[in-house]
Image (cartoon, coloured by chain):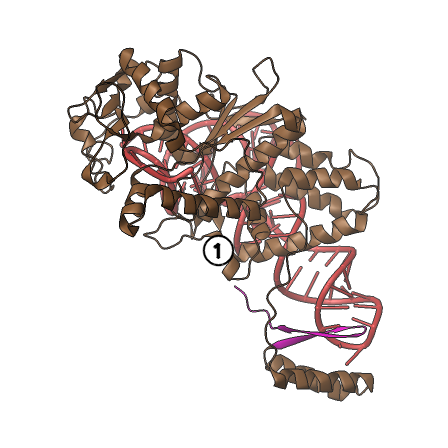
Amino acid sequence: MALQLHDSLTRSLRLLKPSQPDGVYRFYNCGPTVYAASHIGNFRSFVVNDIIRRMLELEFGADKVRHVRNLTDVDDKTIRRAREEGRSLHDVTTEWTAKFHADCEELNCLPPHVEPAATDHITEQVNMIQVLMDKGNAYRAADGSVYFKVSSFDHYGRLSRVKERELKQGTAFEAGNTGKDTQSVDADEKEDGTDFALWKAWKPEDGAVKWTGPDGAAAGRPGWHIECSAMSKKHLGETIDLHTGGVDLLFPHHENEIAQSECCNDTTFAHHWYHSEHLLVDGKKMSKSLGNLYTLDQLKEMGHSPMALRYVLLAGHPRKQLNFLLASLVAAEKALQTLRGFAASIAGQSGDPTKLDPVFNALSDDLNTPAALGALFSIIKQGPADVDAATFERVMFALGLDLTPPPPAAAVEVPAAVTALAERRWAAKQAKDWAAADALRAEITAAGWTMKDRPDGYDLEPAANRP
RNA sequence: GGCGCGGUCGCCAAGUGGUAAGGCCGAGCUCUGCAAAAGCUCUAUCGGCGGUUCGAUUCCGCCCCGCGCCUCCA
């Protein structure tokens, strides 16, 4: 089945196809803001995009996919962080970029082919803003900032259907963003409330962070949206095949990107838009204020593996909100164990390569990962006969599941008393004194340990009491 | 207020106009003295009320409940 993906612009399922004569599929994925460790909700988005990348490679060939994912390394949050820690912006973003890469690697996400950073593309952004100003799509405000004039772009709102939204009294939209931390001075400078910043004039709290702006504008820094327009143009060209991100980016970020790019380049910005849904925790979107935010490190500290998280992320449909539960990680770990056992049972075996088609078909059908997993386990249930090992590996590649056994958990010190009990029970067992052996097992259990017999000895493990 | 999404077995979660995948948990069984591991088996009528239909969980309407977005959050 050919790869199909939901398109946010047309709200329909559409086939993925390279639009350029070179046959290279151009794929841009909005990346992280590097000011702190990304949380597992961020990673849901990146894992989903990783599946897209993998499916594209299987569909068109690894050399026919160009995957770009940016790094936002200058914005309010990165600047604030640097200021609070008394460090340079670069110092802070370098640290968190490295952390992001490490987490991605643990989650088995393929690195994008290009990972452009906003601060490395100031010139490209300034040039783009310049063009927009020259064309009358942007204007300089009193403070030297530059804004995009939304009314100058007829198609504004097509993606998010913002024009169909009615502005009602008392809503966040109308009431000047009450409750949001956007007490932006911008509002006073803009000609229209919906206009957005392309270039932000320097303010004292920006410290050393500033660049020369477009002609006539003050020194400052680029607005958030323009970086993606400029960097996707530089690395993928004026028209790209697919642009993706989390649903929250649909408006205003992607809507604004379209406006900037299309006004600047006079051509279609992206043929296809895809947005993955949010990961919820405790039924709510993760947020610092709710205290329901997890990072990969936190899960690892609880004893969970990155692969288990990846599996959990795949267990929900990418375009449907997924409620994250710690218990799901335990289930995922079990499922992975089954997968490992199955992989071992078919190792080196050749069989019917079409047998796993249902899995690929599910993935090709709008990235239905839960259905794919379901199909996979249905096949596993039928036994290893006729399953082609190489094809199974392709399935694992598509899902990005690394079945290498996780490194053994850090050895926990076994108390001497428990070791002594275990030795006595082993001796009793050798002597076939079952009554004594069973009594000793009970004592070991009471002490909080589990004794697992092997033909030639035994293992001691702390009693399972994970969440 | 606007826009959008969702309510399916104890938990997670696919799916279909003709009586519902899969994972986890649970139960039973087999095999190993016991335990572990492994294997086998079993467990739903799809939020509520109407409508369309030969037939709806699947289509339409209304209601209830939950969630997201509405200017810088993946």
A357 versus B48 height, above or below: above
Seen at 23% across and 35% down, the residue is: A171
Residue nearest the observer in this picture, A29 or A448: A29
- Dot 1 falls on a residue whose secondary structure is helix
With respect to residue A188, does A399 lie above or below?
A: below
Which quarter of the rendering shows the N terminus of chain A? top right
Magenta-tinted stretch: A449-467
Please, what is the dominant secondary structure of the magenta stretch?
strand
Please provide percent x and percent y for residue A388: 80, 40
Residue A367 visible within the image: no
Considering depth in this image, is A299 or B69 the residue closer to the camera? A299
Q: Is residue A169 left or right of residue A342?
A: left
Position above or below: A430 against A380: below
Residue A57 appears left or right of A289: right
Where residue A442 appears, x then y in whole percent? Answer: 66, 83
Residue A39 located within the stretch drawn in magenta: no
Q: Residues within 10 Å of mark 1 (few under 14, many from 20)?
A: some
